[in-house]
Image (spheres, rainbow, N blue to C red):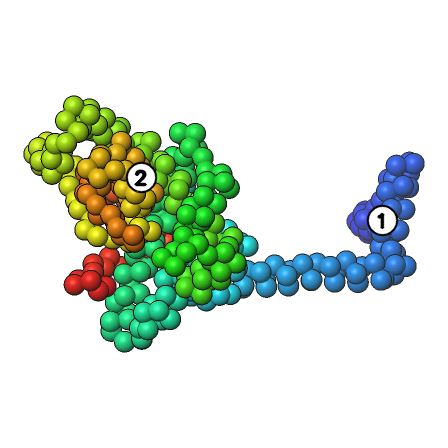
Amino acid sequence: MKKVLTKLKRKKAEPQAPSRITNETVAEHREKILAGGRKFKYPHQYVRHKLVITALAIAAITLLILGIIGWWQLYVVQNTSEFMYRLTRVVAVPVASVDGEQVRYSDYLMRYRSQELWLTTKGQMNLKDADGERQLGYIKRNVLDGVIADAYAAKQARALGVSVNGQDVQLVIDSNRNTATGRISQEVYDASTKDTLGYSPDEYKQIIKQSLIRQRVAYAVDTTADKLQKEIAAKIAASPTGSLKALADSYAATAPTVAYGASGLVQKNNQDGGLSQTALGLKDNEVSKAFRSTTGDGYYFIRRISQNDRQVNYEFIVVKLTVFDEQVAKLKKSGKVKEYISVKEVKQQNGKG
């Protein structure tokens, strides 16, 4: 028995034979040894590696924190400061979307800040009292609706092939430089725009360009208004001395977008969408052909009644554009307009917000 136990103990204590040594196992063993020794041979490389990783982590965390702060300031607090406006000019974040088209926050802030400036400097309104807060609420709603419409117009313009170039914009500016006391220089005009509206020359050109695009799209999509203006033009041609009011009234039941109006005596350079300038080019009792108002609200037929050295008097028929506004309203109703800031619906009462 003792001999058996002794043999078992010896067998258990015998070491296992080493695995077969090959070139591969030697190379693998050597690489393990070298890898373990590198951190002692090249300690600075490992330190720099760790520093880079740490710096990247800190930068990522910092950017995350700044992003959260920026989001909070824009979408919760609704900070409208100069800094936030400049930031959104660089970082294109949306304030809303319409039919998949992003509405830039910078466009909203640019227009809102302009309106706010006018209220405080020209309107001399205290924005912290109840009436001032009501006015700001109305402005926010009006401006947001406006930039949403502009964004949708930009999308429609691409689909319809509608465009506006720098020359188109400059023509509007040149027309606006005509005042009651004469034509002002571009420098004076730019300074006045900055003082009154807070726009730089480039910002104001952007405003005009977006306005022109929306106008041209509104005319392009409203085939109903186009058909009506051609019909009215034919009737005026058949009876050029006929009553414009009677003609407009005849559409009251079938086409309420057709309306009559009269200016009374207004300044020859009156800012009325080009109506006064058109009237000046006519003879008394002469009716113009249909023309598109520069305000983009419809087709006009003008009859000049009289004029003197400084004033002109005219009457008109207007065929109002409605299709584009109806399209935007339909998109909003169907949930295809998404607003990323909370702005209440505010209605003006008695000329106030």
Q: Which dot, 2 or 1, sits closer to the camera?
A: 2
- Count of numbered circles in the view: 2
| Residue identified by numbered label 1 | 32
Question: Picture coordinates of residue 50 (x, y %)?
Answer: 74, 61
Residue type, label 1: Lys
**SS for callout 2:** loop
Residue 125 at least partly seen: yes
Question: Picture coordinates of residue 178 (x, y %)?
Answer: 40, 52
Q: Earlier in the sequence, mark 2 or mark 1?
A: 1
Q: Residue at x 87, y 55 (%)?
A: 38
Q: Residue at x 81, y 48 (%)?
A: 12
**In the image, is residue 351 above or below residue 291?**
below
Residue 105 at least partly seen: no
Question: Picture coordinates of residue 129 (x, y %)?
Answer: 27, 76
Q: Residues within 10 Å of mark 1 (few under 14, many from 20)?
A: few
**In the image, is residue 250 above or below residue 314?**
above
Q: Residue at x 44, y 60 (%)?
A: 193
State the mark number for residue 253: none
**SS for callout 1:** helix
63 or 147: nearer the viewer: 147
Q: Residue at x 52, y 58 (%)?
A: 187
Q: In this image, 276 relative to 91: left or right? A: left
State the mark number for residue 281: 2
Where the C terminus falls, by quadrant? bottom left
Answer with the quarter of the image where residue 303 lies: top left
Answer with the quarter of the image where residue 247 lies: top left
Residue type, label 2: Gly
Q: Residues within 10 Å of mark 2 (few under 14, many from 20)?
A: few
Question: Picture coordinates of residue 70 (x, y %)?
Answer: 49, 62
Q: In this image, 295 relative to 72: left or right? A: left
